[in-house]
């Protein structure tokens, strides 16, 4: 423990003291947390400095939102809470978006914000950066705490860690008033207040009868289907999930961030026949996937229902850590509540060795649709139009990812997101990280920094030009830490496409940006490699070189500005587009 010596009366013994800064650092380190995603300023500047001096990795960002997204995805990738550290009021609010994102996506994260003087804030006397941060964070966080005394730092950090990673993970807010950091207590006494959290995410074993019920329903299925969600990817139960899928022989659909949990090229993967299997399946087993909007709430036409809210007649088995998840949208016939790893293990054990494979009729009809769609896609990908479109550019990305299956793919945009998801196959678990449950723009560069730092792997960020703009300044951060990140900006001159015009001819249309912008020049300002690519061949050469050199690289991929669709794949959710 780094301590300060206090001057006492001559002849008296010096007492070792520890201040609030030190206790926070020691409490984090004691719990194996070695990285902080931060933006310095009053009152946490010294916390960033001293954490770095004490050997922690302190990644300093240009905007707190990006530090927050970095922390959130570090949590997803490592199962340890990602720490975002901000200043009070405005810094806190900038970080809050990511905290809410972490809670919504079930990523473990702790937002630690400095705050102003309590008695002044509470009397609203106009303190520097006055804001009742705890009250504001509470509805957006899984839990929110404030620490007022140095003696309570150990408990505060321990509670934050437990809340972030246990059960269904989420975002936790920890409020630390400026005065806390300056408080000094006896170092030995301080050490005793720190808590090394024992078993922060205890296993939750499913009830045997719930497992039995699930297997009976699964066995009765004529056309079974498994849906893998990002909860299944988070669980790091990859081998058991693979065994379950291969032992049952059931076709599966991965949700976006579960792609690669099983290779997308696996014969049981039904992604290319999604619109066939969802309405046709009679029993669906959800593994760490929620029946939210991304799965059309488990009902309506997507699922074979006659009307938009009508149930399609499927039976659902749902494996989820939260007992409240079942029945959120449609009836769940067999909820299996527990952590994904324990549930899958229990299912495997209870299945025995001879599990009947699904009928060749069901598998054959899926295979037939799949093959047709894959063939159609191959034809489209093989075309080489000028200007380049999403397909011809993503055909390159598809090859590059195939050749580098350990690379982490970051992805955001509308068309740039939807086309990448469907065209670029993933081969390994937790290699695709994207906009998540809310479909937010702005995760790109924060995710890229965290993914490079926590995995040491090459990062490939496929970004819509609009999406990139939300966090683009962090290319400086990527260059400063010299991270192996290759950013590809799919530049179609705007949001969805670049062709809209102001009917009055006065301003650019709201969806349109500066035409032919050179995003590649942004990274050059910071010493990175910028490439302007107008053909698939140029894009391929630039990506190969970025991966070979591991240098920070930004490729401005010029995409036909007419190529996209409004809102990408979710046009149906866009009120005005419906009217059109
Ligand atoms: C924080 C946030 N703001 C706004 C949106 C609305 N939105 C959805 S996609 C998108 C950008 C799409 O354009 P681009 O990234 O260039 O992708 P493209 O479709 O052109 O490939 C926007 C602004 C959002 N999802 N999140
Ligand atoms: Mg665009």
Image (tube, rainbow, N blue to C red):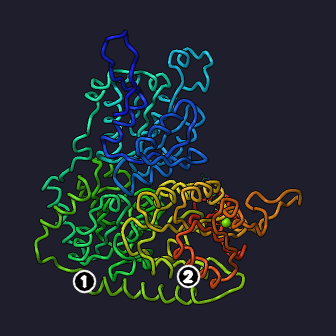
Quarter holding the C terminus is: bottom right
Residue 357, quarter of the rendered image: bottom left
Q: Secondary structure at mark 1?
A: loop
Q: Are marks 2 and 1 in contact (CB under 8 Å)?
A: no
Category of crowding for the residue at label 1, using alpha-carbon neighbours closer than 10 angstroms: few (below 14), some (14–19), many (at least 20): some
In the rendered image, which residue does mark 1 sit on?
359
**Residue farthest toward the front in the current orientation of the protein:** 11
Q: Is residue 9 left or right of residue 116?
A: left
| Nearer the observer, 283 or 538 | 538
Residue 221, quarter of the rendered image: bottom left
Chain-order first, disc 2 or disc 1: 1
Q: Is residue 135 left or right of residue 442?
A: left
Q: Quadrant of ligand 2?
A: bottom right
Q: Is residue 398 left or right of residue 224?
A: right
In this rendering, the answer to whether 445 lies above or below 384 is above
Q: Is residue 461 left or right of residue 28?
A: right
| Nearer the observer, 388 or 300 | 388
x 51%, y 60%: residue: 448
In the rendered image, which residue does mark 2 sit on?
395
In this rendering, the answer to whether 560 lies above or below 21 is below
In this rendering, the answer to whether 560 lies above or below 500 is below
**Residue farthest toward the top in the current orientation of the protein:** 9
x 46%, y 37%: residue: 50
């Amino acid at each position: 423990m780094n301590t300060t010596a206090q001057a006492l009366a001559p002849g008296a013994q010096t007492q070792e003291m520890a201040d609030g800064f030190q206790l926070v650092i020691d409490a984090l380190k004691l719990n194996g947390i070695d990285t902080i995603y931060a933006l310095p300023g009053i009152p946490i500047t010294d916390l960033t400095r001293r954490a770095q001096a004490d050997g922690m990795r302190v990644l300093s960002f240009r905007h707190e939102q990006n530090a927050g997204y970095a922390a959130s995805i570090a949590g997803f990738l490592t199962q340890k809470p990602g720490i975002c550290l901000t200043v009070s009021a405005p810094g806190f609010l900038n970080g809050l978006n990511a905290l809410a994102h972490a809670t919504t996506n079930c990523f473990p994260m702790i937002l630690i914000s400095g705050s102003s003087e309590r008695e002044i804030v509470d009397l609203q006397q106009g303190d520097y950066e006055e804001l009742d941060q705890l009250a504001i964070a509470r509805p957006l966080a899984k839990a929110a705490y404030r620490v007022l005394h140095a003696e309570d730092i150990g408990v505060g950090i321990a509670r934050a860690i437990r809340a972030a990673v246990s059960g269904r993970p989420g975002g936790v807010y920890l409020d630390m008033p400026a005065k806390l950091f300056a408080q000094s207590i006896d170092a030995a006494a301080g050490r005793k207040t720190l808590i090394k959290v024992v078993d922060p995410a205890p296993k939750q074993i499913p009830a045997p009868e719930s497992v039995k019920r699930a297997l009976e329903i699964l066995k009765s299925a004529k056309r079974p289907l498994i849906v893998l969600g990002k909860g299944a990817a988070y669980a790091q139960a990859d081998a058991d999930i693979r065994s379950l899928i291969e032992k049952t022989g059931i076709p599966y659909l991965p949700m976006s961030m579960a792609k690669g949990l099983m290779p997308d090229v696996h014969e049981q993967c039904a992604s290319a026949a999604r619109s066939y299997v969802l309405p046709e399946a009679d029993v669906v087993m959800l593994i760490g996937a929620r029946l939210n909007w991304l799965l059309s709430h488990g009902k309506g036409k997507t699922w074979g229902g006659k009307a938009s809210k009508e149930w399609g007649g499927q039976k659902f088995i749902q494996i989820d850590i939260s007992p409240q998840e079942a029945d959120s949208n449609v009836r769940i016939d067999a909820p299996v509540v527990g952590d994904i790893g324990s549930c899958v293990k229990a299912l495997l054990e209870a299945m025995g060795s001879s599990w009947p494979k699904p009928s060749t009729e069901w598998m054959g009809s899926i295979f037939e649709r799949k093959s047709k769609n894959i063939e159609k896609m191959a034809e489209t990908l093989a075309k080489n139009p000028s200007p380049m479109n999403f397909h011809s550019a993503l055909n390159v990305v598809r090859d590059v990812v195939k050749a580098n299956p350990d690379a982490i793919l970051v992805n955001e945009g509308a068309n740039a997101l939807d086309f990448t998801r469907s065209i670029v196959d993933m081969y390994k678990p937790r290699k695709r990280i994207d906009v998540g449950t809310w479909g937010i723009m702005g995760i790109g560069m924060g995710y890229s920094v965290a993914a490079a730092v926590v995995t040491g792997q090459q990062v490939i960020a496929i970004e819509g030009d609009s999406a990139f703009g939300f966090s683009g300044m962090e290319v400086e951060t990527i260059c400063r830490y010299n991270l192996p990140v290759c950013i590809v900006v799919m530049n179609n001159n705007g949001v969805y496409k670049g062709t809209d015009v102001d009917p009055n001819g006065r301003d650019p249309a709201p969806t349109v940006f500066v035409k032919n912008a050179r995003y590649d020049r942004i990274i050059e300002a910071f010493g990175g490699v910028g490439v302007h690519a107008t053909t698939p061949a140029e894009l391929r050469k630039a990506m190969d070189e970025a991966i070979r050199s591991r240098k920070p690289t930004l490729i401005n991929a010029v995409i036909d500005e007419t190529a996209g669709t409004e809102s990408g794949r979710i046009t149906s959710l866009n009120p005005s587009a419906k009217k059109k």
